[in-house]
Image (tube, rainbow, N blue to C red):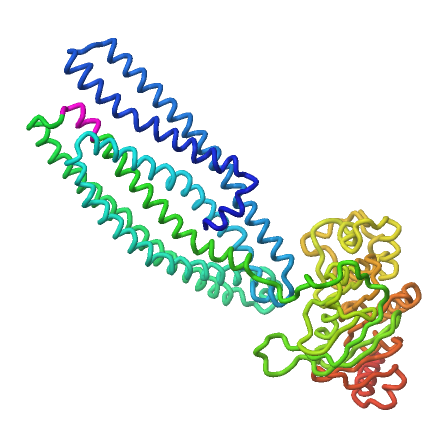
Amino acid sequence: MFRLLRKYTKDGWWAAILGPLFVVIEVIFEAAIPAIMAKIIDVGIHERGGDLPFIREMGLTMVLLACGAAVTGILAGLFSTISSARFVRNIRNAMFDKIQTYDFANIERFPVSTIVMRLTTDMRMMRMAYIAIVRMLVRSPINLIVSFYMVWRMNNRLALVFAVAIPVLATGLYMIMNKAHPRFVVMMEKYDAMNNTLKENIESVRVVKTFVRDDFEQEKFAEKSKSVMVAQRFAEGLVILSQPFFELVMYSVMIAIAWFGGRFIINGFMTTGQFMSYLSYVRAILFSLMMVSSGLMQIVIAQASVRRANEVLDETSDIDDSKADPDLEVENGEIEFEHVSFKYTKDAKVNALQDVNLKIRSGEVIGVIGMTGSSKTTMVQLIPRLYDTTEGTVRVAGHDVKDYKLNKLRSAVSMVLQKNTLFSGTIEENLKWGNPDATHEEVVEACRCAQADDFIQAMPMKYETDLGQGGVNVSGGQKQRLCIARALLKKPKIIILDDSTSAVDTDTDRRIQEALKERLGHMTTIIIAQRVASIEKADRIVIMKDGMISDIGNHAELLERNEMYRDLYETQTEGMAE
C-alpha cells in the first residue's frame, strides 16, 4: 500500500501534504480545550469564587479553539478527499495502461470479470484505506501522543493504567488482523467467480433462452452468491470482534481511572478541574486507540485489493519489443515462416504448430483451409506478434517480426478475427478505428469494397447510424462486412481475413473476394475459410492438418491431387446445388 502511495500521489502531492497538516493543527486545537476547561473550574470557580470575566475570557477561548478545530477538520477532510481520489485515479489509469500492453497470453491469465472487479471494487477499498490512513492513522497517533503527554503531566501515577491496557489492546488487535487478511483474499476471489458467472450469463443470454436454461443459470448464480456471502461473513465476522474487544478494554480503563482518580481527589492529589480535564484526555486517548484500530482494520481489508492491483501492475508481457529497431518500417507484405513451431504454454506436451515453412510474396492472395483445430488461426496470429514463436522465425518484408516495434508491425497488418467486435457509436466512428484521419469518401470506398455500402445507405441515418453496444443493431453478416471495411480503411501491407465471411451469402462472399483482388492487388491477403468458394480464386491455397502444412497449390492443382480438398469441394458444391 505504501509503495503505491509513494508512486501514485505525485501529481496530488500538495493535497497529500495539506490533508495531514490540517489534521495535526486540528488535533492541537482540540487538545488545548480540556486544559482551558480545567482552568475555568479550578481558577475561575474555585480559586476566584466565580470570576465571570475570567470565565467568559476562557469560554471565548474554548469557542475559538473549537471553531479552529472545525475549520481545520473540514479542510483536512477536503484535501484528503482530493488526494485519495487522485491516488485511486492514477492507479486505475496505470492498471488500464498496463492492460493495453498485455499480449494474448497475459489476457488469458486475467479474465474480464476479475479485471473489472480490480478496477472498480478493489479501487474503492483502496480509497477507503487511503482516507483511513490520513484521517485515522495520522490524526489518531498525534492525538494519542498529545493527550497521553497531558495526562502524564497531570498525574503520572494514574497514567500507568494505560501501561497495562495498551499492550493488551495491541496484542488482541494484532491477532485479529493476522487472521483476517487471508480471509479477505478468499472473499475477493469468490467475488471474481460470481462476477465471471454473471458476465457469462449476460453475454450468452440468447443461448440460455434458446435452451430454456434459466432455472439452471439462476441456481448456479445463487450458489456463487451464497459462496460470496459465506466468505464475507467469515472474513468480516472476525473483524467485528475488534469492536467489542476494544470496548471491553476501554470500559475497564474508564472504571480504573474513575476508581483511582476519585481516591486521588479525596486525598488531595488532584483537583476536581484537573480530574474533569483528565477524563477528557482519557476519552481522547481511548477514542484515538479506537480510530487506530479501525484504520488498521480498514488497511487489512484493503490489503487484499492492494495485492490484486499489484498483480495487474507487476504482470509482464511475454512479448517484448524493447530491443527492436525504432526506425525500421514494414516496406511490403512479403511473409516467410521458417521452421516455425508454437505451443500456447511452456508445459504443453504437444505443439499447436509444428515445423511450418511457408513463403508468401507481397501482394499475393493466399487461402488457408483445414479441419477445425488444425491451427489455421494460430499460424496467422504469429504475423503481427499476437503470440511469439516457440521455435523458428516469422519474417515480414525480409525482417524478423521481433526486429519491428509492435506498433509499427501491427499498423502494417490488419486482422478481421473470427469474433467480430464493434463498439458503441456510429458506423463511421467504428470504421475510423482503422484510420482516424480517413475522409468520408475513403470510408465509403472501403465499405463498397466490403459490400457494406448498400445496407448502410438503406438505413435512415446512413453512416451516422448508432450501432449500439457491441453492434447489436446489425446482423452477423453486416457486422462481418463492417469489420472488413474497418480493416481495409487502415490501408495495411497485409490483411488477414479469419473466417470473416462465414455469415454472408455465397454471392456476397464472391463479390468481396473479387473487389479485394481488383482494388487491393498491392496488398498481401490471407483468407482463412471453411468454404472452398471463399478461396478458390486465391493465388495459392494452404491446407492445414494437425498443426502442419499438408499441401500447397492453386484450386485446380489441389482438386487434381489432394483427396481431402476434392472431397470437401464436391461436398460443398453438391450442397449448394441442392
**Residue at point 88% right, 56% down?**
445
Q: In which quarter of the image is residue 510?
A: bottom right
Residue 454 shows up from this direction: no
- Taking the image as shown, residue 538 lies to the left or right of residue 430, namely right
Picture layout, residue 37 above or below residue 259: above
- The x and y percentages for residue 577 are 85, 80
- The x and y percentages for residue 545 are 73, 84
Work out which quarter of the rendered image holds the C terminus and state it: bottom right
| Outermost residue to the left | 267
In depth, the one of 225 and 249 nearer the eye is 249
Picture layout, residue 508 above or below residue 50: below
| Residue 277 sits inside the magenta stretch | yes
In depth, the one of 237 and 180 nearer the eye is 180
Q: Tell me where the magenta segment starts and ends, as one range.
A: 271-278
Q: Is the magenta stretch mostly helix, strand or loop?
A: helix
* Total residue callouts: 0
| Residue 141 sits inside the magenta stretch | no
- Taking the image as shown, residue 336 lies to the left or right of residue 81, namely right
Q: Quadrant of residue 73?
A: top left
